[in-house]
Amino acid sequence: MTSSSPSYLIIGAGVFGVSTAYTLIQKYPNAFVTLVDRDAYDAESRVAASWDWNKVIRADYDDKVYCRLALEAQEIFKSDPLWQPHFHQTGVYWTCRSDYAQDVIANHKELGRNDEIIALPVAEARKLYGGIFDNADYTGVKEVLVNRASGWAAAGDALRAVTKRCVELGVSYVTASVTNLEFDGRGSCTGVKTQSGEILSATHVLVATGAFTPTLLEWSAAKSGNAGLRAGERILAAGITTGMAQLNEEQYEKFKEMPVGFQGYTPNEGKPFIGTLPPTKDRELKWWGSKIFTNTREWTVPGPLQQDIVEARNLWYGPESATWEMTKHRICWDAFTTTSDFIISPHSASKGLYIATCGSFHGFKFFPVLGKYITQMLEGELAPELMEKWAWDRQRPDSSENVEFPNCEMKHLLEPAAKL
């Protein structure tokens, strides 16, 4: 490698990092591309938010930019041999307490899509899929959006498969914990230092570390003396609890053909979108809670959050779910912006440093195309619309209209008087 040859060091092997590595190594087969992550890519379980039992794959966005990008990614999930085995087109069933359904349908029409996407009156929708959502919470629901083109993906399997393909194509995968970014005498980013003291260097350093991003930038700012590295109010790390129930054979037969379900709330209800996914082949049915919490590094799921899972389950399945056997709980961590927009941008405080993060709990569905746009950013070719939307330095409104922004702190949930 000559001193003028570009090299790429990607910190974080979640969907932002792996998608970028896959795009770069395909575009530049002889490039030096390194992924570094605290966990081995084939580990049984991983910290990465991208690693999960399953994730929703949908293009049901009222934001036209994300609608378009999600449709692009969905086509790859459906047709590309690398991605297709992990995608399940079950459809989505979305209770809407606003004009969300009409906005989504309008975007699809404007983008020239003829997917089977409709809005139904509540009474008619409740009869669909054998009436499995008849006991769900329909308080304040105006209509139900049904999109049969959407579905879900086996997230951990997909992430593992794409990372394995990256390695086969020549990407170097390093399992290590990163302690700080490294800089030269002019303040340009040159690499990272790992917990073992090893220095990894490259001409392009991409931080794709999700919820760990503010911490890594804080550590690096303190060590380098460059306060401009800090994320400040741009990024907030937060978690949500997911749970799984083990269905018996009779229950599995009832729910095995179900779609992905979403309870669509507005800021007035004080809840995020609460979803549930179809059971896996192992008869495990998943959903997530209503509390998006900050201010902790907790990985185990305490009692109050397990109760949050129970209450979220009841919003979908009602009294019949009370006897279900709860087998798994997990806290999923991610990075957020007040608008739920990604940050895919050069870092303004250091040459050679780039940021790709803030999945805001909706990044996975873009896995097949994130690398395309991150590579465009690295090469200064990102479309102006996306450059502005995903910029490191941009004006963002407060979070008051964003139901998916963190809504509590873990320490408050764990107080004896906490009410969920």
Image (tube, rainbow, N blue to C red):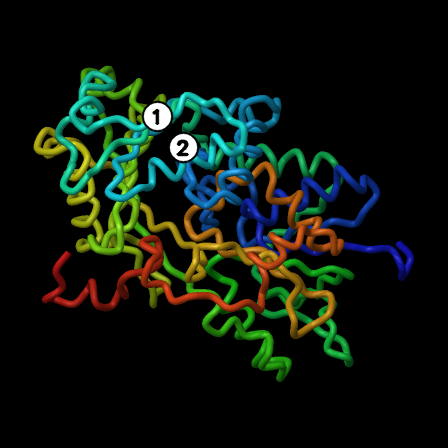
Kindly identify which numbered label has been placed on residue 174.
none
Residue 269 at what x, y percent from top left?
20, 53
Pick the front one: 62 or 49: 62
Residue 42 in view: no
Pick the front one: 121 or 328: 121
Task: Name the residue type under label 1.
Answer: Ile
With respect to residue 184, does 317 lie above or below? above
Disc 2 to disc 1: CB gap under 8 Å:
yes
Residue lying at 48% horizontally and 30% vertically, measured from the top left:
109
Kindly identify which numbered label has been placed on residue 118.
1
Residue 343 at what x, y percent from top left?
55, 58
Residue 273 at what x, y percent from top left?
30, 45
- Image side of residue 193 versus residue 86, left or right: right
Q: Read off the residue under disc 2.
A: 105
Residue lying at 35% horizontally and 36% vertically, measured from the top left:
102
Q: Counting other residues with Cα less than 10 Å from the Cα at mark 1, is it few (<14), some (14-19), or many (20 or more)?
A: some
Quadrant for the N terminus, please.
bottom right
- Image side of residue 103 versus residue 320, left or right: right
With respect to residue 381, does 260 lie above or below? above
Residue lying at 35% horizontally and 56% vertically, measured from the top left:
402
Task: Name the residue type under label 2.
Answer: Ile
Query: Which badge, 2 or 1, comes first in the chain's sequence?
Result: 2
With respect to residue 415, does 387 lie above or below? above
- Give how far apart the Cα atoms at labels 2 and 1 are: 7 Å
At numbered mark 2, what does the secondary structure look like: helix, strand or loop? Answer: helix
Residue 190 at what x, y percent from top left?
74, 67
With respect to residue 126, does 106 lie above or below? below
